[in-house]
Image (tube, rainbow, N blue to C red):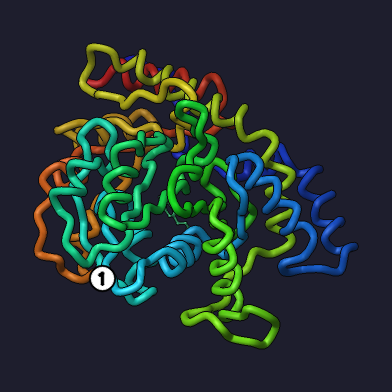
Amino acid sequence: MTTTIGVRVPLNDLSRAIKHDRDRLMRATEAVLDSGYVVLGPHTVRFEDALANYVGVDYAIGAASGTDALELCMRAVMPEGRRTVMTAANAGGYSSTAAIRAGFAVRYADVDEDTFCLTAESVEEALTGDVGVVVVTHLYGRLTDLTALRRLCDVRGIALIEDCAQALGARLDGRAAGSVGDAAAVSFYPTKNLGAVGDGGAVMTSSSAVAAKVRALRQYGWGRKYEVDHVGGFNSRLDELQAAYLLERLPALDVLNQRRRSIIERYREAAQGGALSVAPAIGSAHVGHLAVAVSEDRARIREQLSAVGVATDVHFPVPDHLQEGFPDTGQRLPITERLANSVLSLPCFPELEEHEIEHVCQAIGGLE
Ligand SMILES: *Cc1c(COP(=O)(O)O)cnc(C)c1O
């Protein structure tokens, strides 16, 4: 294999974006300190407005994390009399965690081989009468078309939640990720496309009823201060500092998403006709959260890449239904299980330098 000697390409490096944004982050820090508000203050309100506006929904409600946002969504939209959340088992386990914490049962549907996502067909096949919520994860940055699934959910009286933690900014037919479901969750974990400098998340919805419920649930179930009129409240608020950082970073999101896409396209070109199949990230429906490739010979491929300094990881190695810490649903999910054994992620973040991208391309091209 011929590659540039000595280059080491990390899977991610958060220090680069922090360094790049440092002046703006420091100014935001000072603005928060000067304001005297530290939790759910004016920066949070401004960020919630900016996010709702960006996604094209009526309401965005800050939360402490993406997992909390998912739980808030589930608690807010689960129909009366039902207790089961249906989701994909290949998306990192966050929906399962949120559903279990909310006291709901979980059931899985298999995913599509090419989109890595649930489909109306796979959901319909796995449905039971108790399913009240379907969570779709737009995985790896790719916004999945929800037209058929939306129709199926409407017919069955099921609420649809979008997990946009990996797909913020993705747009399909003029609609953004997070604007089709009854509610949507997003995470601002630092490695996400819109990352905070710590934890954060948000719920997005155009339903005033769902928004009101989420606002109450994120703060002890309070309708009014000290009056608990919603069951199942907890404490999940967005810090002013994180809101201020996110306000600074949101305007650059589209440009950074484009940069991610173009990195993945470079890898794809380099992989043409070779041992590795890199999933496409073309057009505004994909925001390139992860550069994911598929290989039946994953261990060997990862070894070869590692040997020339290219870091890789697996998102995600153990499907939810096979995790020891989640309840056993007794299901088999052939495509999900096959993907768990064959996907790998390549370095993909906007601050990758040209010589690093070129190095990864050469490494991909030299795979045997
Ligand atoms: C990161 C992530 C989450 C969870 O977000 P946290 O802020 O870490 O709780 C949920 N869903 C998906 C798809 C994610 O990638």
Note whether 258 is above or below 75 in the view shown.
Answer: above
Residue 354 coordinates in the image, percent (x, y): 55, 20
Q: Residue furthest front?
A: 155
The residue pinned by badge 1 equals 105
Ligand 1 shows up in the quarter that is bottom left
Residue 78 coordinates in the image, percent (x, y): 37, 66
In terms of image quadrants, where is residue 146? Answer: top left
Q: How many marks?
A: 1
Depth check: give the residue in front, 129 or 105. 129
Q: Which residue is pictured at 70% across the width and 50% down the height?
A: 49
Q: Which residue is pictured at 31% across the width and 57% down the height?
A: 158
Q: Amino acid at mark 1?
A: Ala
Badge 1, how many Cα within 10 Å: few under 14, some, many 20+?
Answer: some
Note whether 195 is above or below 34 in the view shown.
Answer: above
Q: Is residue 159 left or right of residue 222?
A: left
Q: Which residue is pictured at 72% across the width and 69% down the height?
A: 39
Q: Is mark 1 within 8 Å of ligand 1?
A: no
Depth check: give the residue in front, 93 or 88. 88
Q: Which residue is pictured at 67% across the width and 53% down the height?
A: 48
Residue 79 coordinates in the image, percent (x, y): 36, 67
Quadrant location of the N terminus in the rendered image: top left
